[in-house]
Image (cartoon, rainbow, N blue to C red):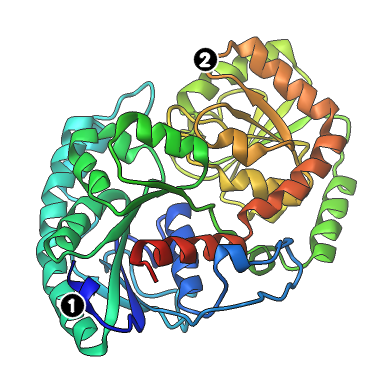
Amino acid sequence: MWFACIAGRMGVRVLAAVRDLDPPAGGAEMSLATLLRGVSKSGPYAEDAPDYVPLEDVEDGQCVDGWKVKIFQSSDRGGITELTKDSGVQRIVCDLPVEDFWSGLAWRLRNRGSGKPNVGSQRRHLRRVNKKFAKWFSKEVQKEVIAARDDGDLLIGVTQLHWSVGAAKVFQENNIPYLVFVRDELQFEHPMMYGGSLANAAAVCGAGYGLLEQIESVFTIKKGVHVPLPVDYAKRFGSVDLVDSERKNGLNERVDKDVPRVAIVGVTPEKGFAFYQRLLPYIANAWPDACFDIYGGGSYVAGLAEFGNVTCHGHTPVNQVFSSCDVHLLTVRSTGSWGRVINEAGLYGVPSVSVDIGAQREAVGGGGKIVERNSSLDVWCAALKACYLEREELGVLARDHAKVIDHRRSIAMFRSVIRDVLEL
């Protein structure tokens, strides 16, 4: 590799090439943005990091200098937001649209039962847009290679999700080692398309060892590394006193304190749409006292509003969601990519019920119940009942477990991955 001959190995340039980052399209973009912001500032490697506790200030200990970070992405969703504004991270955009005729057709031809987009049409969209992105990104990377040589810097690439094929192609052409994050089912749905980008990555990053096992069962990769989802609890939720106050007030203000209330945050084809269509009417008969509060927008949430034990609330801040519910429910169809909302619920002392796929068991820890894959509806109902009855004890464990995705810990681990790849 071209960087191996550079004497001194002075600086590091991180090139993140993605479809979306800022504005974010979802949690995956928020997570990567947090990691990139983190390594752009000084901080410790994982082995030097303290035991971070959510919402508590801790001295970082031995730190290394921050690195140069640039983001290359589409401009289609709009301008820069508070996510990366004034962070020191540079943002370079192309005018490629994130959707086209083929992605629209994939949506129109989606499976009416599961809600999944048509795979063939989606694949045509992805092939076309990755070629276009690679063509644009190649010119930008050539500038970065020259600048890095002039300054004596090392280069490393980072990518994830839809446009990672095009990004990986450019990184390989320029002999730049790169990391790929697997965030959801996308690569699994198109293994022939994404397999090469994963196989040639210096490391494939996933949140949770269970997810890494899923990846390695399908793809040939050089190395899999665990990088937890990063949540800045203080930025999102304020302080311990505020969280405790919101939880206390939320429970006290409930007029139905004896009614079991189960929260579901976000519904997609991957996150349980078809499953909930079976589970909700079953529980209406098996456990008629239970009520389900579903949060989020879109046709999938609306598609569950017909059930009598469901109330749909639209997009709602998570602190409002978890201030008053008893149990949190999250399931996935195929890819256990760690539900960060599980640990956000845990911060409020709310236990979760989830499925034993990928990293979900790690996300829940001792703070909830795990249901084996392909379990019957009565097993799910029993798990929800048990979690409700044990909600006080499990809530304490869930709150303690929330620290596993404290952003400071995740950033330190990400920093260590980059160090190891570049052999700093």
Which is nearer the N-term, disc 1 or disc 2? 1
| Residue 161 vertical placement versus 172 (above, below) | above
Badge 2 marks a residue whose secondary structure is: loop
**Residue at 61 percent of width and 52 percent of height:** 316
Label 2: which residue? 374
Q: In screen coordinates, is 373 left or right of 3?
A: right
| Residue 206 vertical placement versus 117 (above, below) | below
Label 1: which residue? 145
Which quadrant holds residue 78?
A: bottom left
| Residue 78 vertical placement versus 308 (above, below) | below
Residue 60, given in percent of the width and then of the height, sits at 66, 74
Question: Of residues 240 and 101, which is closer to you in this image?
Answer: 240
Q: Which mark is residue 192?
A: none
Q: Considering the image in quadrants, where does the N terminus appear?
A: bottom left
**Residue at 51 percent of width and 21 percent of height:** 275
Comparing labels 1 and 2, the label whose residue is closer to the camera: 1
Residue 362, given in percent of the width and then of the height, sits at 61, 38
Q: Considering the image in quadrants, where does the C terminus appear?
A: bottom left
